Image (cartoon, coloured by chain):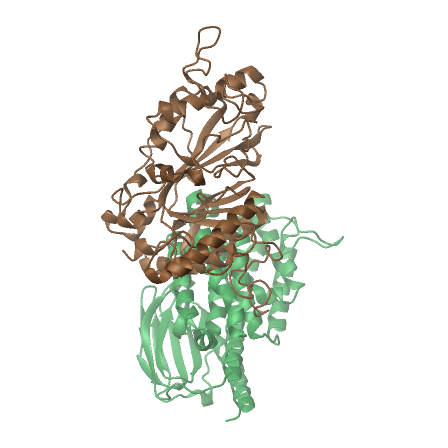
Chain colours: A brown, B green
Amino acid sequence: MTGRLSRRRLLGWAGAGAALAGAGTVTACSATAAPVAEGVVPFRGAQQAGIITPAQDRLHFVALDLTTGDRERVRALLEKWTTAAERMTAGAETAPGGAVGGNPDGPPADTGEALGLPAASLTLTFGVGAGFFDKLGLDPALRPPGLAPLPHFTLDQLDPALSDGDLCIQACANDPQVAVHAVRNLVRIGFGTTTVRWSQLGFGRTSSTSTTQDTPRNLFGFKDGTRNLKAEDGAELDQHVWAQPGDGPAWLAGGTYLVARRIRMHIEIWDRTSLAEQETIVGRTKGEGAPLGATAEFDTADFAALGPDGEPRIADVAHIRLASAESLNGVRILRRGYNFVDGSDGQGHLNAGLFFLAFMRDPHAQFVPMQRALANEDVMMEYIEHTGSAVFACPPGLAEGQYWGEPLLEA
Amino acid sequence: MSRTSRVAVLVTTAAALAACTSTAPPAEDAAGGGGPIAVTAGDASCEVGAAEAPAGNITFSVRNTGTKITEFYLYGTGDRIMGEVENIGPGLTRDLIVEVPDGGSYTTACKPGMVGDGIRAPFTVTGSATRSVDENTRLAEATTGYHRWVTSQIEALVPKTQEFVDAVKAGDVETAKALFPVARTYWERIEPVAESFGDIDPKIDGREDDERDPGVQFTGYHRLEKDLWVDGLQPDSPAMADQLMADIGDLQSRTATVELTPVQLANGAKELLDEVATGKITGEEDRYSHTDLWDFKANVEGSQGAVASLRPVIEEKDPTLGPVLDERFAAVDALLEEYRVGDGYKLYTELTEDDIRRMAEAVDALGEPVSQVAGVVTS
């Protein structure tokens, strides 16, 4: 299987990194010299895990607010979080003997629901929002320019209770209980310094972030993310995903921005739409996922082709045209979203949708023009509404001994 | 002095203290050095006749010159209650005899209206450097101190509930409504002790929708609360009032002999915050009167009282925990002060969603370190 292949590659890198460590070279996996266990994604490296890591099947995402402006307390929390996070991504409890090995008169340090479960490729990805800088009174020069508020897009129905946040933690795993366990324990460790602002479960990935993965489907039944940026894209990632020196504050170089949008999908209405109409709206066939006029999923979309009626084969307002790099002066993003069903809406419908997560070098140069085009022209907007929105800056990966956000707080 | 004899002496002292908080006559063996220290407690002042005293038994003679019922406290580190007198009516004088074995910095406080942090002043105890005592002694002092505090709460609970009961029986609805949250304050501070008896809590504090055995009636504070706020006084309301008083009397006699362990204290402190999280922040408990914030405050005071009793043990086992507890208790107190109206609080129905969210956050922040106390004291 492809998964084994990528693990072996990681192992090789780990060895090389260890060998080069004396020379001061930092490579993606240099921090972890020990062999990587089955289903364990290295926590440390040049970039944070959970971005170009092959998208896992399950998500638990949490946005938190700081309840203190005391920098030292926040620093202490980030250290505790990092220790617990690194242990959990290795399949361990938050602390040695955490679930049942402690003093029986006290509450267990680890909540225990992941006992006996494997690491399940758990990744924990950390980011900071605009409020982090405001509340801690950090030097304005440290504030990433990309955290400026997003504009209001046409038809936005944003709920403040599902938007923004001073910090975020994205937990992805191939076992939902592993992801929830991680978020729950980090939230618990944070009480008194942070409080949950909102959180979102995702039960199935809607993007592939590696050429080794099949393209999954969203709740409209269509393959999603066929043209997504992927781990194998090399220089394209530096161009579109990783913040480069000079883009913003030095601490963010090698990091990225995360845009999160909770998109409610009115699936009941969509389901009453004819297959032909659905395919016209998307611009792809529903079965194969091929661009209209082509035969296979990864065939190049021909946006100039005309149909027998003389109209463009892929409509001017088709979703894939509006969102394409060709229509957006070459803009691309790395999507990593998840399907959700948050129970029901009290009006006889499933509260379903797509939790859009995307990583990029500059939200205002990439997400904003893309979303503006979609909000104004995409026929799909009749079937969806954006109910939550947040932007976070994700620091680069952690070197050995570093804690989450250390380059920012120690800058 | 051997460990056992030390504990025995402390228990004896505690018994003497319990007796002395309710009435005035100073015990002959209580003289610490310079005789009683006069405290003049007004509605907005608290004059303590001396700012220091030698270690040993210290007597405060507290005279209430104000118009409100008052309380007087001597606190140690972390608001550990060294001793207190409750329910001092206007014009009355009551004595507090407190054993302070260790020299150091303490705090006196009068609480006119029995609310808030009170009017505080530093108080120094001289001589007798910190004793070197072993762990069992510290734990015994913790449980003894907490038992003494519980006893004092019940000594205030009994007359306050009697006033409430009298108002109900007299058909004086307005007075009864005003007394309801005040009487409950003493109850809510010590509720885990009552719960430890199992059968008393459902009678005193049960809800209408609790499941009961056939023939068992809905009784207690909340039955009377419903009568007062919703149904109007019923033919059996006076009987219900008498029943409540009888059950409180039962609680008092059983508490006199209850033996508590340090783990029970710690768990009681945690359970009181659980009560806040599930019963008060939700508006569940006082669903007719909406006086939930009175109970909220009392639960937090009860939790703090239990934790403070254990403070010397906590200091020894995990010195980092005490300051966190102090800070988090203070944050909850400060938040509740924002909702104060006179000697009481806003009604639950007057709170916004944002108010409730802030309270939940503060209780979560406090609940985590309080939940660590049991493990720390037994580590």
Q: Is residue A279 left or right of residue B100?
A: right
Residue drawn at 31 percent across, 56 percent down: A409
Please provide percent x and percent y for residue B25: 46, 82
Closest to the observer, B8 or B87 = B8
Is residue A154 visible in this depiction of the protein?
A: no
Please provide percent x and percent y for residue B249: 61, 68
Residue drawn at 32 percent across, 57 percent down: A71
Residue drawn at 52 percent across, 74 percent down: B377
Is residue B266 visible in this depiction of the protein?
A: yes
Please provide percent x and percent y for residue B271: 55, 62
Closest to the observer, B297 or B69 = B297
* Position above or below: A295 against B363: above
Q: Is residue B305 left or right of residue B267?
A: left
Please provide percent x and percent y for residue A58: 55, 43
Residue furthest top as drawn: A309
Residue furthest right as drawn: B214
Q: Quadrant of residue B120?
A: bottom left
Q: Is residue B127 left or right of residue B374?
A: left
